[in-house]
Image (cartoon, coloured by chain):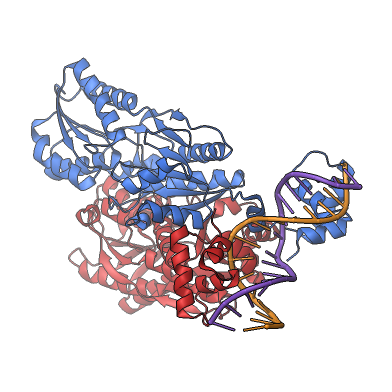
Chain colours: A blue, B red, C orange, D purple
Amino acid sequence: MVSIRDVAKEAGVAISTVSKVLNNYPNVRDETKARVNKAIEQLGFVPNSIASALSSKRSGRIALVLDVDRNAQAVDEIPMQYMIGAISRAKELGMDIITVFTAMLGEMDTGEMTRYFQSQSVEGLIICGFSEQDEALGRLIKSGKFKSVLINAPDVDENTSSIHIDNRRAQYEVAKKFLAESTAFCREKRILYISGKNEGYVSSERLKGMQELAKELSLMLLVRTGRFSELEARKLTMQYAACKDAIICASDLMAIGAMKALIDMDIYRPVCGFDGINLMGYAGKQMHTVGQDFKKTAACAVEEAARLIGGELGREIVLPHKLMRIKYLDVIS
Amino acid sequence: MVSIRDVAKEAGVAISTVSKVLNNYPNVRDETKARVNKAIEQLGFVPNSIASALSSKRSGRIALVLDVDRNAQAVDEIPMQYMIGAISRAKELGMDIITVFTAMLGEMDTGEMTRYFQSQSVEGLIICGFSEQDEALGRLIKSGKFKSVLINAPDVDENTSSIHIDNRRAQYEVAKKFLAESTAFCREKRILYISGKNEGYVSSERLKGMQELAKELSLMLLVRTGRFSELEARKLTMQYAACKDAIICASDLMAIGAMKALIDMDIYRPVCGFDGINLMGYAGKQMHTVGQDFKKTAACAVEEAARLIGGELGREIVLPHKLMRIKYLDVIS
DNA sequence: TTGTATGCGTTATCAG
DNA sequence: CTGATAACGCATACAA
């Protein structure tokens, strides 16, 4: 392995000079810089990131914590989008992502998690889908031992940033548009709203948005908890849909569950989702939903983690959303 | 940060002794070992993997190269399964996975890739869905600079192992069973086989299996290339299905495309897939397919990479498959 | 602007 | 069985 020392020798300069060139330090004469770069080129030198990390005590490593398996979701489209977004941006920034699944953290207590991440030289955490139930993880975040970026959770402190869309407003808007465009079908006053979880930031925000609209339009709103589960949404639909005019769900997955149930029941009710996943294209009918750019969200989270690691303070970032409908033919082409 | 040196002091032994305990070396008296472990416990010491890697020149890092985006697949279920399997097993083995998307390697030539992986201190590569088109990547593998494990590609040499199912046999078996169980519908002799790519190991193996069966059963086989694309399969179905008795596809995604097309055409033909992905549950009709355990495959790949890194020689591993049908209700529960 | 020297936290060699 | 000590490749304060 060719090292910085070989480069120095080849270029006829000191090791530290090479290091300076490598890290774009100022105060290096252009001519020297050129000599060093030429030597680097000739020798095919590749800086050793491990040695660099050890010496500088900065690994540039962040852990992307994904909540897969938990809901035994059929299709893990959202985590995949997060991954792609995060990894791509991290590469551009010269950072390093390790992916961790909550299932792997499962039984660990806060101390074990700390040790695990420390042993991996992790400096920052990006946590997707953090829920209050993860007490150990919650304590880890609050400990401030790692810079954290929470996607879809509200907590912010000096070491912690939060990234999310305006869930309340988005739910309000999509439901409003959905109802306006579905009025062809009867009176649309009796609404089944399938919420996410009873507790949980995202769920309660979306519920608020729905309730606001219900008040405004004098809707008869029946709220039930679908736990973000497709199966649960299916059951609720079978139970309640017959005597409702429309179904609004706090997630696309639940909307798909509802729609498939309706098809099996052989009745029609308009269904509204939330998230904008491609799987919506396979539900059989086009539905209204809220589109989010998960890749961009994750990319933003990486940048934010870098910012926190750089010493800046945690903050809240609200990303845009859009209203959309997803068609099978668009999805596959 | 508490280091090995602190532990040594606390335990009243030398640094090297602590290191030996840490790495389960022989020739350490039990009593000494106990003292060291107690000190580790008390101080909450966590070994620094970076320093360890630098010193031992073994990073235990392997890159999982995934082919997402390429086909602009609607749902990236298979890569996600690979990831989960690989990361979980790697953690158990104390190894380290970085995920790389072929899109990120896109424009790089072999030299750039080499430098990239070297800079990441990668020792091994697990490549999912390698195709001959990736010439730069192919040269990288052949260079032997990294130990490689190829999933679904046949090349094997001293530094390279290959893992796959018996694609030929699987295609033969699933098609045979599919046809046997679909005979309720007319004569089933005129078959549209939608193949993967014209070139490509997996595709040609599956095609061979199909051709073998066609010969055996005197089928009239029309072979067309779907490029593993759902859209392409849709088009082919619309073009040919009317005058065929059944459609057999070299992937589930194409089978779904075919089935959705049939539904839109409002005709019925039995469709057979290959892979066993959950998305099959959303296709509208149950289909026969080949089930593969992608998680296990990736876990096996990680083990194999570890083996290669340990100095053993490359080999070919054939994993089992099964015949199955995927139902929506099974998928969501 | 460039060079020297020290240390980062381990592993590994070798002497005791 | 245990302890000194020299690497590992780089960053950085400090000296020149």
Residue at point 87%, 50% (across, down): A35
Q: Is residue B66 left or right of residue B59?
A: left
Q: What is the x, y in percent for residue B236?
A: 39, 53
Is residue A98 among the parts visible in the rendering? Answer: yes
Q: How many marks?
A: 0
Q: Is residue A13 above or below residue B250?
A: above
Residue A195 lies, in percent from the top left, at: 22, 35
Query: Is residue B154 visible in this depiction of the protein?
Result: no
Q: Quadrant of the N terminus of chain A?
A: bottom right
Quarter location, residue C4: bottom right
Q: Nearer the viewer, residue A205 or B136?
A: A205
Q: Which quadrant of the figure has residue A89?
A: top right
Eyeballing the image, is A179 above or below A66?
above
**Would residue A182 be found to the left or right of residue C16 on screen?**
left
B10 or B85: nearer the eye?
B10
The quarter of the picture where the C terminus of chain A appears is top left
At which x and y percent is residue A5? 80, 60
Does residue B249 appear to the left or right of B198 in the view shown? left
Between residue B41 and residue A144, name the one nearer to us.
B41
Q: Tell me what residue is drawn at x 45 percent, y 79 percent.
A: B30
* Residue A295 position in % (x across, y down): 47, 41
Left or right, B325 with respect to A127, comes to left
Q: Residue at x 37, y 36 (%)?
A: A152
Q: Nearer the viewer, residue B296 or A285?
A: B296
